[in-house]
Amino acid sequence: MQQVFHRPVSLKDVQTHFCPGCHHGTIHRLVAEAMDHFELQQRTIGVASVGCSVFLYAYFDVDVVEAPHGRASAVATGVKRARPDSFVFTYQGDGDLAAIGTAEIIHAANRGEDITVVFVNNTTYGMTGGQMAPTTLVGQKTSTSPYGRQREKDGAPIRMAELLAQLEGVAYSCRVAVDSPKNLMVAERQIKTAFRYQVEGKGFSFVEVLSSCPTNWGMDPIKANERVGAEMIPYFPLGVFKNVGNL
Amino acid sequence: MGNEECRKTGEFCLDPRTVYLAPDFVEACVQNNRLFVKGNEAVAMAALEAGCRYYFGYPITPQSDIPEFLSRELPKLDGEFIQAESEVASINMLLGASATGVRAMTSSSSPGISLKQEGISYMAGSELPGVIVNISRSGPGLGGIDASQADYFQSVKGGGHGGYRIVVLAPASVQEMYDLTMLAFDLADLYRMPAMVLADSVIGQMKEAVVPHPRPAVDLPAKEWAVQGKGGGEQRIVKSLYLGDGELEAHNWKLYAKYEQLRGKEVRWEEFLADDADLVVTAFGSVSRIAKTAIMQAREEGLKVGLLRPITLFPFPAQAYARITGRCKKVLDIELNTGQMIEDVRLSVTKDTEVFFYGRPPGAGSLPTPEELLEQIRKHY
């Protein structure tokens, strides 16, 4: 009998700590599949961030450095400069990358560091219990925006994929979602494209992945999954915002 | 690059365009195997000699000679120089490079070192080596650029969160800037922890003769923890998060054991005319130079005064104080602050020792003169 579906070798055979319905597990799998596709496992150095994504090393069977909150792209810069032959990726949430780590991500991108950044946007701080994030939608209630995010006071959510696409150093920037089979297949392809940029030494690549967070949104997994399409995608449009090499 | 290359090229650190020396003087220095350079340049030279090829920094006075020097020299050696967007980013670049097993460094001055404390704590927690140079300036806040020793507490007591220590070395000459920078890399690698060179603008900006020497042969452990991509081996993880039952406590005791080992094996200090002294002056770094002059003047007056100068601020040479104050019962502690090292001095001297203090908190015109310190010596003798 032929086996047609298996766990990516870059992913460990363990249970994750992610909540039911959370998209992190799916995104982990897509990243691991891209890693397998380019046979990168043995030369990959992952950079874990702070938040639900901190346990990168528990799920990916690759070497991992844990970065302080927000600093993953600066750590990845040091790793890649010291070991240019390795494949270096960061995996960061929205609080990590789009709030406390904005300086680090913008300047790593602007320098055109030859790294790949996987940015998981679930419009909230997951691990700390659902506080308002820079990506929280206007009107969205969180534990620190109990009356809903107010544009006048809190600003509007940041669209990181579009913002980074403005920088000369960025080779590839896109936004994907994993809420439907169709979107998931696009996400799989575009994560691979982002990886290809680094594999071919063509510069900084960035993938923003829209993710659900049923626990902190106070929704069941199905409703949370529906919210991605109903509320997030209208504000955070899916697409490729930069692709300098047309890979 | 060692003496041989220096002799051959004469341009390694003595580019007359940048070092402002007449070419014939440069030639004479090289012939005599002595270089006439700033303390900051000596740090950069020693780092290169120690095999450091990765530098991450951010401009701040009075340490900018270090990044300027390395931005010029590292590309010639296939190294990497990054002027980062902030001190926060640069310490994290150091963390990343160091995690892969290479020798790397950063430098800054007090306000910048404050920003690096987060990263230093993570490096200490993750047991990562790495050299941090603090050419400190005065504070608090923006303060000024004058020579200051007000970062003693921040440096030796664990400046960031979580209760850790780092190696802290305090050079008092340009030669020591060279020697101790090299030592910092070795101690960092030996003990898998960050090491700091703590100086100020007096030592960093002063030019003195330096005899460069090749990297000493030190038996260093293989970096079997470094992340380099599995390459067919076991997964390696560099982290400071420990959530399992008892894990973090055990980790903290493991770090503590290293600090104890340092206290036993790595303390360094200088004694000057201390054997027969009735009053021992204690001071570190720049102000110890002024104190030495005052001590020699006091000796001319027939006062038996000596100096005890800690070279390692962490580990603190407590045993030296205990031994000396077994006989000499008066210690005069002199610092460029309102009194910080004095707390460690008091903990280290014998019970019946009197400890006096003279401090000049930093600011323009507040560097004490030898005569001023001689006055203090007379007062407490």
Image (spheres, rainbow, N blue to C red):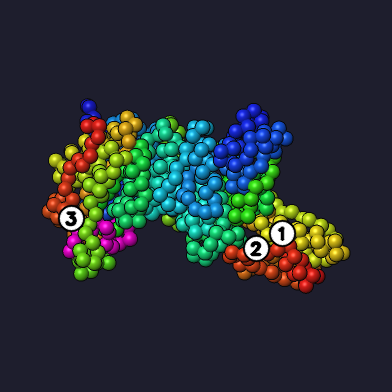
Residue appearing at x 46%, y 57% in the figure: B115
Task: Indicate the amino acid at tag 2.
Answer: Leu
The quarter of the picture where the N terminus of chain B appears is top right
Write down the chain letter for disc 3: A
Dominant secondary-structure state across the stretch colored magenta? loop
Residue A73: horizontal and vertical position, in percent? 37, 46
> The residue tagged with tag 1: helix, strand or loop?
helix
Left or right, residue A125 beside residue A180: right
Residue A95: horizontal and vertical position, in percent? 31, 56
Residue B48: horizontal and vertical position, in percent? 57, 38
Residue B57: horizontal and vertical position, in percent? 48, 47
> The residue tagged with tag 3: helix, strand or loop?
helix
Q: Are marks 2 and 1 in contact (CB under 8 Å)?
A: yes
Q: Is residue A59 visible?
A: no
Write down the chain letter for disc 2: B
List the residue tagged with mark 2: B367
Measured in 3D between alpha carbons, the distance from the residue under mark 3 to the one under mark 1, in whole angstroms, is 70 Å
Q: Is residue A138 visible?
A: yes
Left or right, residue B203 beside residue B325: left
Residue appearing at x 44%, y 45% in the figure: B83
Residue appearing at x 41%, y 32% in the figure: A85
Residue A173 is one of the magenta-drawn residues: no
Residue B342 higher or lower than A160, as above or below: below
Task: Indicate the amino acid at tag 3.
Answer: Ala
List the residue tagged with mark 3: A224
Name the disc covering residue B290, or none. Answer: 1
